[in-house]
Amino acid sequence: MSTSSEITPGGAAPALATVALLGAPPLIKGENARGYDDLLARICATLQPTDSLEEIWIRDVVDLVWETFRLRRMKASMMTDATHEELGDTLSKEYAGARETVQKWAAGDAGAAEEIEAALVGAGLSMDIVVARAMMYRIEKMERLDRMLMSAEARRSAALRELDCHRSPLAQKLRRSIAQAERAELVVDAPRLAIEAAPA
């Protein structure tokens, strides 16, 4: 799916007709642009916008969902980095070469993981303790990220409520139109139905 106003290579139109007016997606360099496009396409397929206002609200929702994902990734990355650092600090007091081993562990080396596990047990520690210490030293940053997450989620919910409010009167109008059409059809058919219902 394309986030431009052009037709995609497969010949399909963009998910939002107003996408060119809404500007480029709010992506940070290096973020997964395809992931954003897929999210936009999926939400458009689910909500099926019927006018420009709905397209704007859907774009707001997508951007806020993406912001929520980004903040969650940031939180996980912060804790991963903090744990890595705390592990290096903790084990460097126990044995020489600990930081190099921690680097290998962070890169996914299975031998380094076993060595670190043994070193932690030998020091009377566990990975849970290391993670707890890492979090304790960064608790203010974690809380700030949590507040940002709550704000993004609240704004996303508000955008969805606006979409619901916009669609509700349209649905009521549609129901009234259908009811009027049905009544008109019954009035037209009434003489025929009366004749059919009359005894022979």
Image: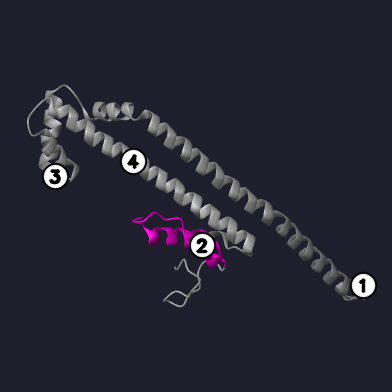
x then y, percent, for residue 66: 45, 51
Q: Nearer the viewer, residue 110 or 197?
A: 110
Q: Are marks 4 and 1 in contact (CB under 8 Å)?
A: no
Residue named by callout 1: 198
Residue 142 in the figure: left or right of residue 84? right
Mark toward the viewer: 4 or 3: 4
x then y, percent, for residue 95: 8, 28
Q: Amino acid at mark 4?
A: Ala
Residue named by callout 3: 109
Q: Which residues are magenta?
A: 18-45
Q: Main secondary structure of the magenta part?
A: helix
Q: Are marks 2 and 4 in contact (CB under 8 Å)?
A: no
Q: Residues within 10 Å of mark 1 (few under 14, many from 20)?
A: few
Q: Amino acid at mark 3?
A: Asp
x then y, percent, for residue 40: 48, 60
Callout 4: helix, strand or loop?
A: helix
Looking at the image, is mark 2 or mark 4 earlier in the sequence? 2
Looking at the image, is mark 2 or mark 3 earlier in the sequence? 2
The residue at 45%/46% (across/down) is: 68
Q: Are marks 4 and 3 in contact (CB under 8 Å)?
A: no
Give the spatial CA distance, label 4 vs label 3. 20 Å
Give the spatial CA distance, label 2 vs label 3. 43 Å
